[in-house]
Image (cartoon, rainbow, N blue to C red):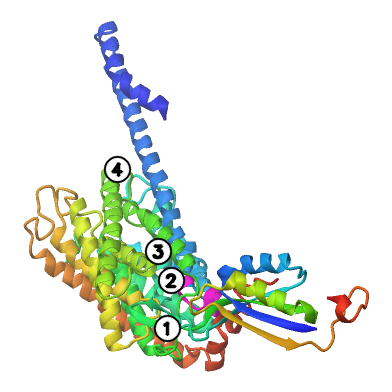
Amino acid sequence: MLKIEAILQPSKLDAVKDALVEAGIEGMTILEARGHGRQKGHTEFYRGREYTVDLLPKVKIELVVSDDLKEKAVQAIIGAARTGRIGDGKIFISRVEEAIRIRNDERGETSL
Amino acid sequence: MCCRIVKLLLLPAVLAVQALAQPTASAPATQAQIAALQQAVQEAHSAADNAWMLVSAALVLLMTGPGLALFYGGLVRRKNILSTMMQSFAMMCLITILWAIAGYSLAFAHGTCFIGGFEHLFLRGVSIAPNLDYAATIPEQTFMVYQLMFAIITPALITGAFAERMKFSSMAVFLSAWSLLVYSPMAHMVWGVGGLLNANGGRIPSLDFAGGTVVHITSGVSALVTCIYLGKRFGYPHQKMQPHSMVLSFIGACLLWVGWFGFNAGSALGSGSLATSAFVNTHFAAAAAAVGWSIAEWLHGGKPTALGAISGAVAGLVAITPASGYVQPFSALAIGFVAGLFCFFMVFVVKKYFGYDDSLDAFGVHGAGGTLGALLTGLFATRAINAAFGKDAPTGAFDGHWSQLFNQAAGVGVSWGISIVGTLLLLFIVDKTMGLRVSPEDESEGLDLSQHGEEGYDLNS
């Protein structure tokens, strides 16, 4: 089982969510986040003083999928989120040790 | 109401019929009828004035709660929103009680030329009957409660200077005492019977229609003194301390603009044409000032911010306050526009240069705007709008009375003086007995939690 974490532009959330559902992935967790990579922040003015805001709003999607769905999920995300500009985001993949369904104690890939 | 107007219109017909019907014995009956009709007209007039004055009083209170509470509240960091609003609300409550006990008497009772006496302590003698010294067509209680709303907002304005770092208890004591020691005397000098600066017979007749000196200079200058005495917020100016909700501030500013119609037009103490002049001038000045500030900000190298626009509007409203019942509409546009530019300069250049932490620009807008407005009143006041000094006597400089500028300067000087001295004295006393500032930990945690044990927003509950 793999955990896929994708950090995205907030405006891409709906498109990515739809693409994942279409790819057959049924569960996901969405978090509101702030951050930046190479994308510079923006400047704001307050009483004539310029302030750099470098914590930009982002959206993070977390999925846990079976190994065979990895490429499909990744392609779904990239297809929906890519614009070609700096700020598109990143995907991280890590291995998950265990997954348990709380309702009925199912474990392993059947719980996903 | 309808009945009385109909009666008035029918009066000539009635008289004519009576004269034809009974040529000899009708004189006393006609006289009685005329007297009754005159009484009816007077009552209608009073009813109109009182209705407008009660609405105006409500509008001015609206300026404090929630106008100022929202305006200031949105400008502070989220952890201080409630405490900022509480400061305005506390004034609504505490000043009311003090005003009823002694504040009104010290401001408006007969006394010396500097302060009123104790004639109206506990509102003794303040009844439904008009007080002929001030407003002959409305109950004195209306006048008293209207003036109370001014007494409430003036100390509330000062809270902007020491936002995010003053103890609630000390603030309550300090501002309550300030209201009696600075506000009431200043109100007496400018508006009270026998006052030193009263336009109506004072030794130095100063034109201040709705409180440029009494409200804005005193609060603004006291704000400057307080923010310097207290010192800067920790982290100012390097740390980013931005408004957490410009939305709230925007709403607050609009409430201030609308409420100001009660502040200025209500100062006509009646519903006649003078109220109209003040109303129009108020609105024109706000609009012109917002434009002025926005242009200045845009040219200064930034973008036209919402904060700038609303601050500009408030600056215009402040500047027109002393002039509102004395000037022509296009003078109001000019006063507003200049105030927008001037207050922009005070906030963006002067504040930056001296480095004082006037957190919400109480001095930059109210102190500076009030000073400018008081002086421009001397320039633009005209007998065409308000023959304040007599039917054919010129009022302001352009009207022909250039020495009025000295009188205006005197009013400005007195208000600066009493504010600086009174505020320093009170700050010193409260500081030595209670302490003024919160501890660094409390300041860092935020005043909502440290002073009130509350959070302004709990969006997860």
Q: Nearer the viewer, mark 1 or mark 4?
A: 1
Location of residue B266 with respect to B103 vertically, above or below: above
Q: To which residue does mark 3 refer?
A: B104
Mark 2 — on which chain does it sit? B
Q: Position of residue B185 (x, y in %)?
A: 32, 71
Element on which disc 1 rests: strand
Q: Measure the C-alpha gap from mark 1 to mark 3.
A: 50 Å
Is the residue at mark 4 from the same chain as the one at mark 2?
Answer: yes
Determine if residue B111 is in view. no
Q: Is residue B121 magenta?
A: no
Q: Measure the C-alpha gap from mark 4 to mark 2.
A: 30 Å
Q: Amino acid at mark 2?
A: Ala
Q: Which one is earlier in the sequence, the residue at label 3 or at label 2? A: 3
Is the residue at mark 1 from the same chain as the one at mark 4?
Answer: no
Q: Position of residue A84 (x, y in %)?
A: 50, 75
Element on which disc 3 rests: helix
Q: Amino acid at mark 3?
A: Tyr
Q: Position of residue B85 (x, y in %)?
A: 51, 71
> Looking at the figure, which quarter contains the N terminus of chain B?
top left
Mark 4 — on which chain does it sit? B
Q: To which residue does mark 4 refer?
A: B272
Location of residue B162 with respect to B400 vertically, above or below: below
Q: Which mark is residue B156?
A: 2
Q: Measure the C-alpha gap from mark 1 to mark 4.
A: 53 Å
Mark 3 — on which chain does it sit? B
Query: What kind of secondary structure does the magenta stretch mostly adopt?
Result: helix
Q: Amino acid at mark 1?
A: Thr
Q: Amino acid at mark 4?
A: Gly
The quadrant where residue B320 appears: bottom left
